[in-house]
Image: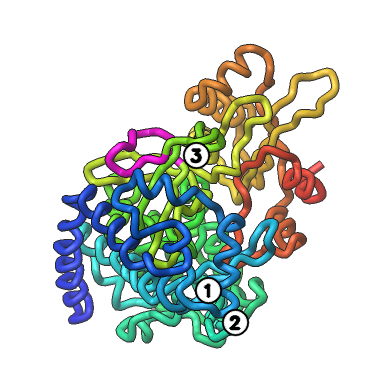
Amino acid sequence: MSLKSFAAKIFAKNIATKNTKWISKPIETQEKVFHQLIQKAANTKFGKDHSFNAIKTHKDFVKNVPVRDYEALKNYVDEVVEGKSNVLWPGKPAYFAKTSGTTSGAKYIPITKESIKYQIEASRDAILNYIHETGEADFVDGKMIFLQGSPVLQEKNGIKLGRLSGISAHYVPKYLQRNRLPSWETNCIEDWETKVNKIVEETKDENMSVIAGIPSWVQMYFEKLQIATGKNVGDLFKNFQLFIYGGVNYEPYRAKFENLIGRKVDSIELFPASEGFFAYQNSQQERGMLLLLNSGIFYEFIKADDFYEDNAERITLKDIEIGVNYVMIISTNAGLWGYNLGDTIQFISKSPYKVIVSGRIKHFISAFGEHVIAKEVEEAMQMAIKATDARINEFTVAPQTVTTNELPYHEWFIEFEKEPENLDLFIKTIDESLQKQNSYYFDLIEGKVLQTLKITKVQKNGFKNYMVSIGKFGGQNKVQRLSNDRKLADGLKEFTLI
């Protein structure tokens, strides 16, 4: 055991002990965070506009602060972008995380010196927790890579801005700098395909032990490695031990990854966003991610089924139920208040509080009242892959409402790496899994309102070419898993197999 790995184990034990304190007192911890946030921001413009000085309880907060998404909060954010101080949080933010927006164009998510500290600590603690749980630390002696956006930052009215992953790159601790790849110059390349090709050249002869990124883009890196070397990733990187990912569910990609690697490797799921770092996988033996309750974020939850109703109930951690689909609402030390992140989650444990990401509140299929969500289609896909030994590169689902002389249906666009030997069994497994998970879908199939799903096969690299065509290839961009309209489906049509 090297001195570095020995030190990592000691550090991991200390952090685990420290975190046990707030994990063991979840409700008290969130209460403390709530009051600290309100007190700190009481004299900001937002705090004064919403009478923070009068807020003593969560009930007061609900009365004074409505739920907002970015568009509804934009008038405050615009003032911050203009360079004004004490708008959403005391002083000015340290950064803006620039992300693609919807109706407002680019979104500027404020990141303060307080919030970036917790972002970096959460990334660190996820790895240290793995070391503490498994006792495995030798990987710290190898090379590590995170496929991310460019770390080049611009400036707007004295505040630096860039992608979240690019901002985070400036906070890699010195003791990891020598282990980190790719080079700074390569990381700054904007064109994604050029960047990945250069990363392949820089890493193919290195001792890679940790690889991180969104699964679909790491898959592209692995495929290029295989083409360049003629070897499985696991043979090329004999000490590759840990895959760290976030952004999408890994399970639909797992079979393809293990084929590319040639063996199984441990993985850690993260739940980060520009707005905050919310959870990480804390056990290799159990599913779900530990919700971070002591990271400057106060959480509220609204049942997804009730979200669009007037005066939908906003509850706190103490009132959540296991297995219910919730929209997660956050208030943070970056100055986001009653903020609808857009993600939906489900709790799978209360001791400790652990969650899975079930989808996006705007991403669902309910063209016929079926209320199908991302978690359900991903679990159905996972079951079908296991039942037929298929492998996929990517998929998305959309409703087909316009038909001739037949019932409407869900259309699954799938890019197969390895097609199932029995496509009928593949379809049957998906359909049965959806019916089992979703009673609305079951009723519609049983009542002959919907017919069984249909599969449209997508060309090799079809999803990649589609993403290139809409200017969303690489970086943190990812394919939308399902939608309630045909926009994505119609865009994919030219990339399908006839």
- Image quarter where the C terminus lies is top right
Q: Is residue 329 visible?
A: yes
Q: Is residue 197 left or right of residue 39?
A: right
Mark 2: which secondary structure?
Answer: strand
Depth check, mark 2 against mark 3: the one in front is 2
| Mark 2 lies on residue | 156
Secondary structure at numbered mark 3: helix
- Picture residue at 28% right of the left edge, 65% below the top: 125
Residue 148 lies, in percent from the top left, at 52, 71
Real-space CA distance between mark 2 and mark 3, rounded to the nearest whole angstrom: 38 Å
> Was residue 317 drawn as part of the magenta stretch in this picture?
yes
Three-letter amino acid code at disc 3?
A: Lys
Q: How crowded is mark 2: few (under 14 residues within 10 Å), some or many (20 or more)?
A: few
Q: What residue is rendered at 43% in x and 78% in y?
A: 91
Q: What residue type is labelled 1?
A: Phe
Does the magenta-highlighted stretch encompass residue 177?
Answer: no
Residues packed near mark 1 inside 10 Å, few (<14), some (14 to 19) or many (20 plus): many
**Which sits in the foreground, 214 or 82?**
82
322 sits left or right of 442 in the view:
left
For disc 3, the marked residue is 375
Of the two numbered discs 3 and 1 on the same chain, state the one appearing first in sequence: 1
- Determine whether, in the image, residue 47 is placed left or right of residue 76: left
The amino acid type found where label 2 is placed reads Lys
Q: Are marks 1 and 2 in contact (CB under 8 Å)?
A: yes
Report which residue position mark 1 lands on: 96
- Is the magenta region chiefly helix, strand or loop? loop
